[in-house]
Image (cartoon, helix red, strand yellow):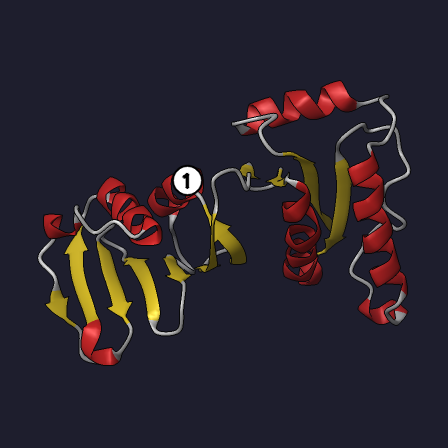
């Protein structure tokens, strides 16, 4: 059983339903130049590996009349590797990533480059307002946490417990500048994570922060 991921141009859809409609409309259209370039790179990297380490479930990819869309799939143990490659190749070309299994549309428009660790889905290279709003209310076991990291020792993270209470912590450069707070409001958590990512601390006084000793 394989796991599907799809690339499509940034800005052509804002919801999974709109992405599905866009992809349907691309069927039968000649392959876009950007898609051909990404597909060639993926095929080359896959072919350079021993067969046991190949990350494409169906290769070669591309070469089909899907317009500006590129469909790729991998075995489950290669999801993260392939996704990282797709971000590497697609983001500079202003392409978004659509995950139809999770109904996640990850569009780089107005993104902030950060290292994002999503407890249920792995690592991502950037954060957007749409993503933080999507992810925070849906955090759940077995990995109900999200970490956003910038410079070394600068990060913000949250954990959602079984009672749907969020622990929110941030570090400003050292263990002595590590603070934590609690809230039951996922919207506030999303707001504060986005504020941290954009360098805006004006709403941080909405919570009672205390030093965290690790």
Label 1: element kind = helix
**Residue at the disc numbered 1:** 134
Q: Is residue 4 left or right of residue 14?
A: right
* Residues packed near mark 1 inside 10 Å, few (<14), some (14 to 19) or many (20 plus): some
Against 160, residue 28 (above or below) is above
- Residue at 74% from the left image edge and 18% from the top image edge: 25
Residue 7 in the image: x percent, y percent? Answer: 69, 39
Residue 55 in the image: x percent, y percent? Answer: 78, 60
Q: 189 or 153, which lies in front?
A: 153
Against 169, residue 34 (above or below) is above
Res 144 seen here: yes
Res 1 seen here: no
Q: Is residue 161 left or right of residue 90?
A: left
- Residue at 52% from the left image edge and 27% from the top image edge: 14
- Residue at 70% from the left image edge and 61% from the top image edge: 78
Q: 49 or 107, which lies in front?
A: 107
- The quarter of the picture where residue 65 lies is top right
Q: In this view, does 94 lie to the left or right of 115?
A: right
- Residue at 77% from the left image edge and 23% from the top image edge: 26
Locate the C terminus by quadrant: bottom left
Residue 70 in the image: x percent, y percent? Answer: 77, 38
Q: 32 or 146, which lies in front?
A: 32
- Residue extending farthest to the left is 208
Residue 169 in the image: x percent, y percent? Answer: 24, 63
Total marks in image: 1
């Amino acid at each position: 059983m394989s796991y599907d991921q799809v690339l499509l141009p940034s800005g052509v859809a804002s919801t999974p339903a709109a992405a599905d409609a866009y992809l349907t409309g691309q069927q039968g259209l000649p392959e876009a130049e950007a898609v051909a370039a990404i597909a060639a790179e993926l095929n080359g990297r896959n072919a350079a590996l021993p067969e046991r380490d190949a990350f494409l479930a169906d290769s070669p990819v591309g070469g089909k009349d899907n317009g500006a869309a590129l469909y790729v799939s991998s075995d489950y143990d290669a999801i993260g590797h392939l996704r990282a490659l797709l971000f590497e190749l697609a983001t500079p070309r202003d392409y978004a990533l659509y995950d139809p299994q999770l109904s996640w549309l990850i569009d780089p428009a107005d993104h902030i480059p950060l290292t994002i660790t999503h407890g249920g889905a792995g690592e991502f290279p950037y954060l957007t307002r749409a993503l933080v709003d999507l992810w925070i209310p849906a955090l759940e076991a077995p990995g109900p946490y999200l970490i956003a990291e910038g410079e070394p020792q600068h990060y913000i993270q949250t954990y959602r417990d079984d009672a749907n209470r969020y622990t929110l912590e941030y570090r400003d450069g050292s263990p002595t500048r590590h603070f934590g707070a609690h809230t039951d409001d996922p919207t506030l958590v999303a707001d504060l994570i986005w504020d941290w990512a954009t360098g805006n601390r004006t709403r941080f006084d909405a919570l009672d922060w205390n030093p965290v000793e690790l």
